[in-house]
Image: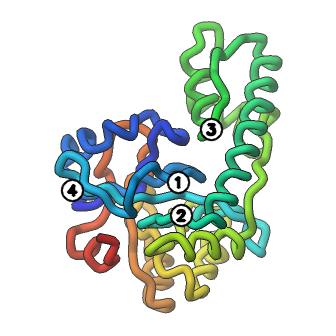
Amino acid sequence: MPYADLHVHTTRSDGSLELEDVPAAADRAGVDVVAVTDHDRVQPFDAPVVERKGVTLVSGIELRVETPHGERVDLLGYGVDATGDLEGVVDRIQTNRVERGRAIVDCVETRLGVDLGVTVEDGFGRPHVARAIDAHPDVEYDYEDAFDRLIGSGDPCFVPRDVPTFERGLAALTASCRLVSLAHPLRYRDPEAALALTADPALEAVELHYPYGADVDRSLVERAIERNELLATGGTDAHGHDLGVAGLSRRAYDRLELS
């Protein structure tokens, strides 16, 4: 069981776990440290790292950016003490998220002839739509079908987000965070191009430990770590209540010097 799960989402973005329930979920999983990394949201903590009910909570953020080669990747910021610059980036993203969410919901409701009964507000994302589709009694699609056939990239109700450039997002995170890591590099269309970004000295880490699946070869990430002298981060990428699926040992966590 990992000591630290450094990739967890709550209802403040597209997770189903309430922020105040994170310590209990960590306790159930036997996890001592959790980084709360909601999409494009700064956490309401009074310090970059806090203690809650015997669990260490790291204030984190997952920020999507557009790379020079045209692919979108996610950056994980840890130990956030937000500057005005990062807050401005996040505010613009959240405004766009609401606009995009309304457009997706309108499209799905019109296409399926139903009322999904969702409220589009700060932190809203496609998983909210997929869950509403799955729960609707008059809709034949389940959660996975929603992404595969309705709201996934290239599908009829997909609406792209406006995101900052890699350079803009990385600069805002570097000024606000104790550590910045490239999230789940093997999930991208071109993992090698994504990992090439770690040559930037401001990007000090990469997410090595992740629930990719047993058959995924992590050697590409390991070589990038060695080549660019990176730290390794890891986490479950939890959008539900189950933590500790992936993460770091205590020794690996201590290397990050977040606490």
Mark 3 burial class by Cα count in 10 Å: few <14, some 14-19, many 20+: some
Name the one closer to the observer, 169 or 150: 169
Question: Is there a contact, CB below 8 Å, between mark 4 and mark 1?
Answer: no
Q: Which of marks 2 and 4 is in front?
A: 2
Question: Is there a contact, CB below 8 Å, between mark 1 and mark 3?
Answer: no
Q: Is residue 208 left or right of residue 119?
A: left
The percent coordinates of residue 98 (x first, y second) are: 72, 37
What residue is drawn where x is 42% and y is 70%? Answer: 208
What residue is drawn where x is 39% and y is 40%? Answer: 19
The percent coordinates of residue 26 (x first, y second) are: 25, 46
**Disc 4: which residue:** 32
Say which mark, if any, is on residue 82: 2
- Residue 213 in sight in this render: no
Mark 1 burial class by Cα count in 10 Å: few <14, some 14-19, many 20+: many
**Disc 3: which residue:** 122
| Mark 2–mark 3 distance (CA, rounded to whole Å) | 18 Å
- Residue 218 in sight in this render: yes
Q: Nearer the viewer, mark 2 or mark 3?
A: 2
| Mark 2–mark 1 distance (CA, rounded to whole Å) | 7 Å
**Disc 1: which residue:** 42
Question: Is there a contact, CB below 8 Å, between mark 2 and mark 1?
Answer: yes
**Is 58 rendered above or below residue 221?**
above
Mark 2 burial class by Cα count in 10 Å: few <14, some 14-19, many 20+: some
Amino acid type shown at disc 2: Ala
| Mark 4–mark 3 distance (CA, rounded to whole Å) | 29 Å
